[in-house]
Amino acid sequence: MFFSIPDGTFTICRDAAGIAGNIFAFGLFVSPIPTFKRIIRNQSTENFSGLPYVYALLNCLICTWYGTPLISFDNVLVMTVNSIGAVFQLTYIIIFIVHADREKKIRMLGLLLAIFGLMAIIVAGSLQIADRGTLWVFVGLLSCASLISMFASPLFIINLVIRTKSVEFMPFYLSLSTFLMSTSFFLYGVFNFDAFIYVPNGIGTILGILQLALYFHYKTKSVEESREPLMVSHA
């Protein structure tokens, strides 16, 4: 005998996972606030890098566009979380530019303009695609690639933790928030039958588990807590 699950159950589970993802994402968005309080207090960006926030802004803008009803169906929660994320990232970038030295200021302004220019090209190019299915796949692939690149960025930190045997540059709450958000949107994508969401977030979930496992393995060897790993320039 086969049992069928009512469509309403999938909808409820999808929405619950999406709302949870929005909540956990908010925790992730506010995590850099202590670092920017320090920047404002010291009136200097010191050795911090603004590049992660530029990449995060681009990712949020692409995913917001994918979540709009013009592109995909029933992905409003993807649009809301990423639009809120875009506001946070833009705010961080503006604060960084205001307090950066002249060289960093010019570089960051150039990158910000490039991000907006690229998004204008993506939006304008997308709207030229008449077939709805092709449009969904095109923007979906861009969104998926953007998410995977964002989730892959902690690989440097993971490598650093393994080499130094210290979690100094990988604070627990940041790793936990990333894991919970990725897991929530992985489930959201599964219940919404959207591979462009559950594939990259599935990868993010696996990386989140790895980060948490490393944290608990090396936490006793850490000598101090991280200031904010995603802001430190290791270039």
Image (cartoon, rainbow, N blue to C red):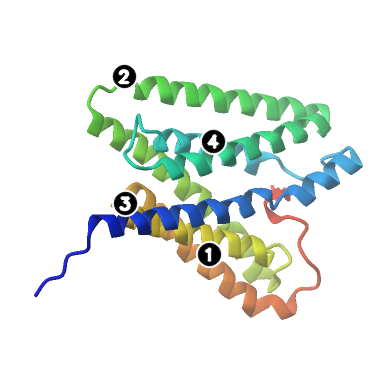
Q: Residues within 10 Å of mark 1 (few under 14, many from 20)?
A: many
Amino acid bearing label 3: Asn
Reading the image, the residue beneath label 3 is: 192
Residue 57 screen position, x and y as percent: 58, 37
Q: CA distance from mark 3 to mark 1?
A: 22 Å
Asked which secondary structure carries label 2, the reply is loop
The residue positioned 50% from the left and 40% from the top of the image is: 80
Q: Residue furthest right?
A: 42
The quarter of the image holding the N terminus is: bottom left
CB atoms at circles 1 and 4 under 8 Å apart?
no
Q: CA distance from mark 2 to mark 1?
A: 37 Å
Does residue 205 appear to the left or right of 56 in the view shown? left
Q: Residues within 10 Å of mark 4 (few under 14, many from 20)?
A: many
Asked which secondary structure carries label 4, the reply is helix
Amino acid bearing label 1: Gly
Reading the image, the residue beneath label 4 is: 58
Above or below: residue 130 compared with residue 227: above
Residue 53 showing in the rendered view: yes
